[in-house]
Amino acid sequence: MVDVLSELHERYGELINRALERYLTIGVDPSFKEAVVYQVSTGGKRIRPLMVIEASLACGGNVDSSLPYAAIVELIHNYSLIYDDIIDEADLRRNMPTVRKRYGDYAAILVGIWYREAIEEAILETKDPRVVAKVVADTIKAIDEGERLDILMEYSGRRDPYFIENRLVREIKPGLRELYVKMISLKTAALFKTSMWLGGFSGNCSGEQLEALGNFGYNVGVAFQVIDDVLDIFGDLRKFGKEIGKDIKEHKVGNIVILLSLLESSNAGKLLSILSKPRPTQEDVKEAVEVISSTRARDEAIKMANEYMNKALSELGKIPSNEHTRKLEELAKFIVYREY
């Protein structure tokens, strides 16, 4: 059985890829082109641009006019990943070397700057660049703030004085769950919300429809990040494409599975001792997963993702049903039930 993501990739994937390369290669030096297109050439689920296209079509738009908007959100996503990998000193993404690993940190910084300006190139081809530019600026600021909170929720580590001095997790307390939702609402859900809003905007949705589509995107985005957190601890590397247990090695309390385990487990002290180590080993990761597995954290996280998915589907119900809203519904369910 073909999943909805594969089906939509078959339909629109090549169009999206061509649009991404077109915006990225405007004015690029031939010797820099390989490094610039590398990030998007490594693949990715392309969920966000596919959501843009389906949201546009749901409101009577067309594929061609939605492509600049689709490219914008995918470029924002990959722009954020390039810097995320620099910040985390990550070597692997999508089962391939990260930009920083392949070309070096300084080159990765320059590639990231290029992506930001490629986003501007795409904005110029939208029907109202001033409106779109403001939405894009607000979205990138939200992602940046979410990344800041994510780092501040690490239990230990980091060399930067700012993050050491302003660390938000010095003890485990119930209010951290609300902080986690705030963090992922910015870091992840903001771009899903923008994807749906821009798609609807390109398809001339009404104001009420734009609000419903944005709310759908927000709730889908929260569910997406919760499942990503589950997969970080319990996923299959061959399917997930990222290092399993990476969040443990990065001392993250901003992973819902780790956080719920700490709030519940009688062995929280053991888990905190692992998160306190400067460089947790694979054996430490294995031990941490055993502690987490002894709690209800995984089931609670999946329950949470389902709750947000159901909120998303409720918002989608405010849009007249058609084949494209049904595809968006399938995407929401895919996000919660996926293995990668």
Image (cartoon, rainbow, N blue to C red):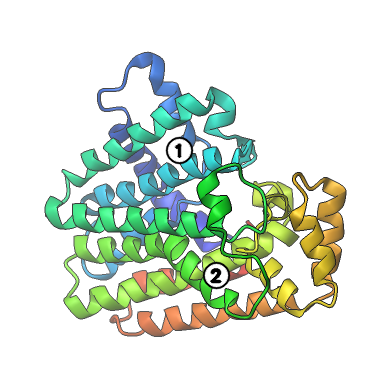
Disc 1 versus disc 2: nearer the observer: 2
136 or 340: which is nearer to us? 136
Residue 284 position within the rendered picture, expressed as x and y whole percent measured from the top left: 84, 52
113 or 123: which is nearer to us? 113
Kind of residue indicated by mark 2? Tyr
The residue wearing badge 1 is: 40
Q: Quadrant of residue 304?
A: bottom right
269 or 237: which is nearer to us? 269
The residue lying at 13 percent from left, 53 percent from top is: 130
Residue 62 position within the rendered picture, expressed as x and y whole percent measured from the top left: 23, 58
The residue wearing badge 2 is: 180
42 or 305: which is nearer to us? 305
Q: Does residue 41 appear in this view?
A: yes
Residue 53 lies left or right of residue 272; in this view the side is: left
The residue lying at 44 percent from left, 46 percent from top is: 80
CA–CA distance between discs 1 and 2? 28 Å
Kind of residue indicated by mark 1? Val
Secondary structure under tag 2 reads helix
Identify whether 312 is placed above or below 259: below
- Count of numbered circles in the view: 2
Q: Quadrant of residue 281?
A: top right
The label on residue 266 is none
Residue 317 lies left or right of residue 307; in this view the side is: left
Secondary structure under tag 1 reads helix
